[in-house]
Image: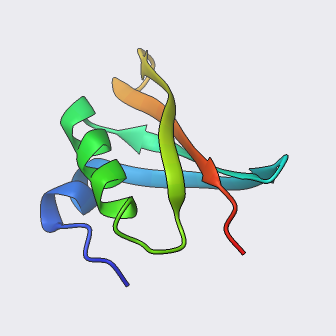
């Protein structure tokens, strides 16, 4: 288990995990861009996660949160 930090957990909510074409896609919502970057940095410390990329970020005006998605290569 990786400690994602108290600020990160409060500011990032993981909403979906999906697997497509040997890539794992994580998507969710965040209060700010810094929390997304911090979350990505913490995920990179997990040994079975390789080549993680931020796929998309977009401000959702309906809830004033940032919708985001990451993807990384599936590691066997």
Identity of the residue furthest to the bottom in this view: 1
- Does residue 32 appear in the picture of this structure? no
- Does residue 19 appear in the picture of this structure? yes
The x, y position of residue 54, in whole percent, is: 47, 35
The x, y position of residue 67, in whole percent, is: 47, 31
* Up/down of 42 relative to 76, above or below: above
* Up/down of 38 relative to 6, above or below: above
The x, y position of residue 66, in whole percent, is: 38, 28
Q: Residue at x 35, y 50 (%)?
A: 40
The x, y position of residue 20, in whole percent, is: 82, 47
Closer to the camera, 29 or 62?
29
Q: Residue at x 46, y 75 (%)?
A: 47
Q: Residue at x 49, y 48 (%)?
A: 52
Quadrant containing the C terminus in the rendered view: bottom right
* Up/down of 33 relative to 11, above or below: above
On screen, residue 24 versus residue 57, left or right, reads right
Residue 3 in which image quadrant: bottom left
Closer to the camera, 51 or 27?
51
Closer to the camera, 60 or 47?
47
């Amino acid at each position: 288990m990786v400690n994602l930090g108290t600020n990160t957990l409060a500011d990032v909510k993981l909403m979906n995990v999906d697997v497509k074409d040997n890539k794992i896609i994580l998507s969710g919502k965040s209060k700010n861009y810094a929390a997304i970057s911090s979350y990505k940095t913490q995920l990179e410390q997990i040994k079975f996660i390789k080549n993680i990329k931020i796929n998309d970020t977009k401000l959702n005006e309906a809830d004033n949160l940032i919708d985001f998605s990451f993807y990384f290569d599936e590691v066997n």
